[in-house]
Image (cartoon, helix red, strand yellow):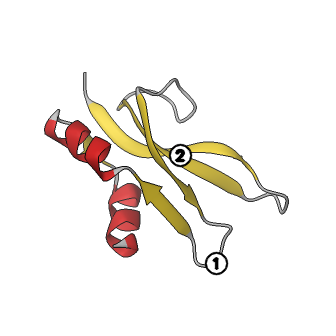
């Protein structure tokens, strides 16, 4: 099974902006499909945007063969 670390919509804030979870999911699954693990969250509504990810879990999944989407890779590089 090909695994992907990507964003999943989680909910809306009061001003109708979405919050996102950083999840591990099958590459072929839809955006709202059941995930294997939740690694953190991304809240673009706050200024500056908040990115919180459990680095230990992230490294575990990468060692198991999960690949990060371009968006997640970009968010993590900006948040360092």
- The part of the image, by quadrant, that contains residue 15 is bottom right
Q: Residue at x 68, y 67 (%)?
A: 45
Q: Residue at x 64, y 53 (%)?
A: 19
Answer few, some or many: residues within 10 Å of disc 2's Cα (few below 14, many 20 plus, some between 14 and 19).
many
Q: Are marks 2 and 1 in contact (CB under 8 Å)?
A: no
How many numbered discs, if any?
A: 2
Residue 8 position within the rendered picture, expressed as x and y whole percent measured from the top left = 54, 42
Tag 2 residue: 21
Residue 36 position within the rendered picture, expressed as x and y whole percent measured from the top left = 40, 26
Label 2 and label 1: CA atoms lie apart by: 18 Å
Viewer-proximal residue among 4 and 23: 23
Please state, as top left, top right, bottom left or bottom right, where the C terminus lies in the image: bottom left
Mark 2 or mark 1: name the one nearer the start of the chain: 2
Element under label 2? Answer: strand
Q: Residue at x 17, y 35 (%)?
A: 65
Q: Is residue 62 left or right of residue 42?
A: left
Q: Which mark is residue 9?
A: none
- The part of the image, by quadrant, that contains residue 13 is bottom right
Q: Which mark is residue 47?
A: 1
Please state, as top left, top right, bottom left or bottom right, where the N terminus lies in the image: top left
């Amino acid at each position: 099974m090909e695994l992907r670390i990507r964003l999943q919509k989680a909910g809306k804030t009061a001003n109708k902006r979405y919050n996102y979870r950083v999840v591990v999911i099958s590459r072929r699954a839809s955006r709202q499909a059941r995930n294997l693990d939740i690694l953190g969250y991304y809240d673009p509504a706050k200024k500056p945007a908040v990115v919180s990810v459990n680095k230990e879990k992230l490294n575990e999944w990468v060692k198991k063969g999960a690949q990060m989407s371009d968006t997640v890779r970009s968010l993590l590089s900006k948040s360092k």
